[in-house]
């Protein structure tokens, strides 16, 4: 149980005071939020995190409500 709680706390989204909108499960915004909470993202250098946030946060703000299932490879390449 202790390990479960540790992992749960490690992957829980940080409390930002309600500044960031919550997105529905399966949406692009939820994917971005989950990525920012992931240990793999948090293990990156601070400058890398800043750069990734600089790119992904505006995309999530505009397209966060859209389902990830509709995201096509051509959009990622653009």
Image (spheres, grey):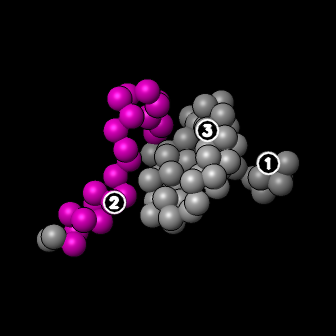
The residue indicated by pointer 3 is 57
Classed neighbour count for the residue bearing mark 2: other residues with Cα under 10 Å, few (<14), some (14–19), many (≥20): some
**Left or right: where 69 falls relative to 25:** right
- The answer to which of marks 2 and 1 sits earlier in the sequence is 2
Instruction: Kindly indicate the quadrant of the structure image that contains residue 6.
Output: bottom left
Residue 31 position within the rendered picture, expressed as x and y whole percent measured from the top left: 53, 50
| Mark 2 → mark 1, Cα distance in angstroms | 31 Å
Q: Nearer the viewer, residue 71 or 16?
A: 16
Stretch in magenta:
3-24
Classed neighbour count for the residue bearing mark 1: other residues with Cα under 10 Å, few (<14), some (14–19), many (≥20): few
The residue indicated by pointer 1 is 75
Q: Is residue 19 magenta?
A: yes
Q: Nearer the viewer, residue 75 or 19?
A: 19
- Say which mark, if any, is on residue 27: none
- Say which mark, if any, is on residue 10: 2
Residue 55 position within the rendered picture, expressed as x and y whole percent measured from the top left: 69, 43
């Amino acid at each position: 149980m202790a390990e479960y709680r540790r992992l749960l706390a490690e992957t829980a989204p940080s409390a930002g005071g309600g500044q960031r909108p919550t997105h529905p499960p399966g949406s692009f915004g939820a994917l971005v939020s989950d990525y920012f909470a992931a240990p793999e993202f948090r293990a990156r250098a601070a400058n890398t995190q800043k750069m990734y946030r600089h790119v992904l946060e505006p995309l999530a703000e505009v397209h966060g409500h859209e389902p990830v299932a509709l995201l096509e490879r051509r959009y990622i390449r653009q």
